[in-house]
Image (cartoon, coloured by chain):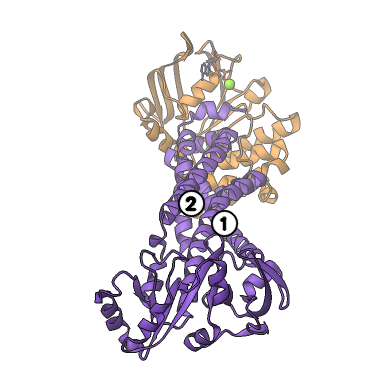
Amino acid sequence: MTGKLVLENLKNRPMRTLLSVLLIGVPVTLILTLVGLSHGMLEDAQHRARAVGADIFVRPPGSSFLTASGAMPDGILGALEKLPHVKLAVGVVNQPVQGVTLGIAGIDLKQFDIISGGFRLLAGTTFQGPDDVMIDEFYASEKGLKPGGRVSLLNHDWRVCGIFEGGKLAHIVAPISRVQQLTGNVGKISQAYVKLDNPANTASMVQHLKSDPMWSNYPVYSVQEFTALYSINNIPGLRQFVGVVIGIGVVIGFAVVCLSMYMAVLQRTREIGILKALGASNGFILRVIVAEALLMGVGGTVLGIIMSYGAWWLIRTLVPASIQMVIVHSWWPIALGITLAGTGFGALYPGISAARHDVIEALAYE
Amino acid sequence: MNNGHVIQTRDLRKIYRVGKLNVAALRGVDLAVQAGEFLAIVGPSGSGKSTLFHIIGGLTPPTSGQVLVAGQDLAAMSEAERTRMRKRTVGFVFQKFNLLPNLTARDNIAIARHIADNRKPDPAFDDILRILGIQERLDHKPNALSGGEQQRIAIARAVVNHPAILLADEPTGNLDTVNSKTVLDMLKDLNGRLGQTILMITHNPEAATYGHRTVQMRDGKIVDAEPGT
Ligand SMILES: Nc1ncnc2c1ncn2[C@@H]1O[C@H](COP(=O)(O)OP(=O)(O)O)[C@@H](O)[C@H]1O
Ligand SMILES: [Mg+2]
């Protein structure tokens, strides 16, 4: 019966209810989109790193797993290949082209094909000349590019020779010598991918490289270590940023509900008087108000989830190469909890003030 | 002292503080009402009739004096106790009907049962609905009901928990003659058939004749108690 009263109260002012739900839903969308982006970008980076097919990653001295560029002499590849168990060492030059999320990788296609099993071409051909780039389907769709089209990257005019299935290394790959030349890195690489005779030797090889004084300056990671580094905790400030957005979500939910329920309580002063005349306790009145707010919170969460699919669709359609977003189901209950906390607290003040209405005054309210 | 009296007040006083002024709404009311009685209360506006109802109905405490309703001493009760008392002991009927606008007539009655934790099936209540002639209108919301229908729903709601007393404050004040007569007939019917104790405030001398006796108030006191016709 209480539930019916709450529902009918919500239905009676559809505009107010919908607006409140929308306003509660927006921060939910923000939270879910931010979390979805974090997860999406990290998973994408992990996935692309893993798809290279290397067992060990070697990076330039002084770099971290997050720095896309940096340089070390490509002579280290030969040195790496001389080590026991190393089958192949492949160098790559990375250069960001847009923000930190989209980069071009300079590769030696033959070597890279051996280590990774090659790119799967969806259209066009592999490099036919030094000024050819291959792009993945995400970048192709984001920029509307087709094989034979031209694209300007690193202040250089390239011909798109082929489009490959994304999810490997980078969204854009070009011949390594041209990228080295354009970025002032002739004879240098920013990352070495090492393939072993047997992945089972990875741990001992990493150990060996770390203890060898010749390699001790070079950050060395197993593929597991490297991909594990792509976590929310390792991106500077990301955790705090998520926290701030959650805080904003709680405050907005709180404020929206506080205002909306406060107005509802004013409007319903007389009805509250009627309930109290019938013997409804202060707790009953408070429960009705809080239940209404929590219901709007649930509605807002559902709407927020739906709108996060909208954000996901927009990102996938408009900027699939630049940013990646995934739907993180495990955050739905968290978003719901955050919203219910905000809306529940927001309803407390209106609810308590409603419960404290003097019954005779409330009944006389016009 | 409670020889069949369902209501008994002694030297009941109520002083409202308005700003720095004390307004004496009741100045010593002594009233005794027998169970099963239908009492009409008349008097000029401002004479304290509604205040008396509010105290007897447990909506507000008296400033001083004694008030016993169905054996309970209301003057000694906390606000929460009075609220609990209202669930089953008192039924209110107001001039302005005071139905919950968002609920159907049926749910308006049901919520009074719900608040009173009254879960007992009550087949006899169908008879009451029949007496009130509102079975056909139960699925409408108040704004789809005429004033007379709304007041009959309000009466049904007031008696759904079989209260010891029914307090009706100018129940026909917002109704035309025809509907007034219907509502008064129904109150009389409820009183006659079920022995429902009813106290009714009215401005209308003709309405007052429906009661067994009439009590007159003036300046916060009962000035005259005369038997009804
Ligand atoms: N809540 C209140 N605050 C202050 N004065 C009140 C209040 N309620 C009633 N009064 C005063 O008490 C007196 C009696 O009012 P009331 O009981 O409503 O009379 P009646 O119902 O006979 O018209 C009036 O003078 C009225 O102004
Ligand atoms: Mg009055």
Secondary structure state at the residue bearing disc 1:
helix
Residue lying at 61% horizontally and 76% vertically, measured from the top left: A136
Residue A240, how many percent across, how many down?
41, 52
| Quadrant of residue B102 within the rendered picture | top right
In screen coordinates, is B145 left or right of A167?
right
Residue lying at 51% horizontally and 63% vertically, measured from the top left: A36
Seen in the picture, residue A73 relative to A309 is either above or below; the reply is below
Ligand 1 placement by image quarter = top right
Q: Residue furthest bottom?
A: A197
Mark 2–mark 1 Cα distance, whole angstroms, equals 10 Å
In the rendered structure, find residue A339 and report the number of the disc placed on it.
2
Amino acid at the residue labelled 2: Thr
Answer with mark 2 or mark 1, whichever residue precedes in sequence: 1
Q: Residues within 10 Å of mark 2 (few under 14, many from 20)?
A: many
In screen coordinates, is A61 left or right of A353?
left
Residue A73, how many percent across, how many down?
42, 73
Residue lying at 57% horizontally and 14% vertically, measured from the top left: B46
Q: Foreground residue, B172 or A284? A: A284
Residue A92, how many percent across, how many down?
48, 75
Residue A19, how many percent across, how many down?
63, 46
The answer to whether marks 2 and 1 mark residues whose Cβ atoms lie closer than 8 Å is: yes
Which chain is disc 2 placed on?
Answer: A
**Chain given the colour purple:** A
**Chain given the colour orange:** B
| Quadrant of residue A65 within the rendered picture | bottom left
Q: Foreground residue, B37 or A17? A: A17
- From the image, tell me which residue sits under label 1: A304
**Looking at the rendering, in which quadrant would you find the C terminus of chain A?**
top right
Same chain check for tags 2 and 1: yes
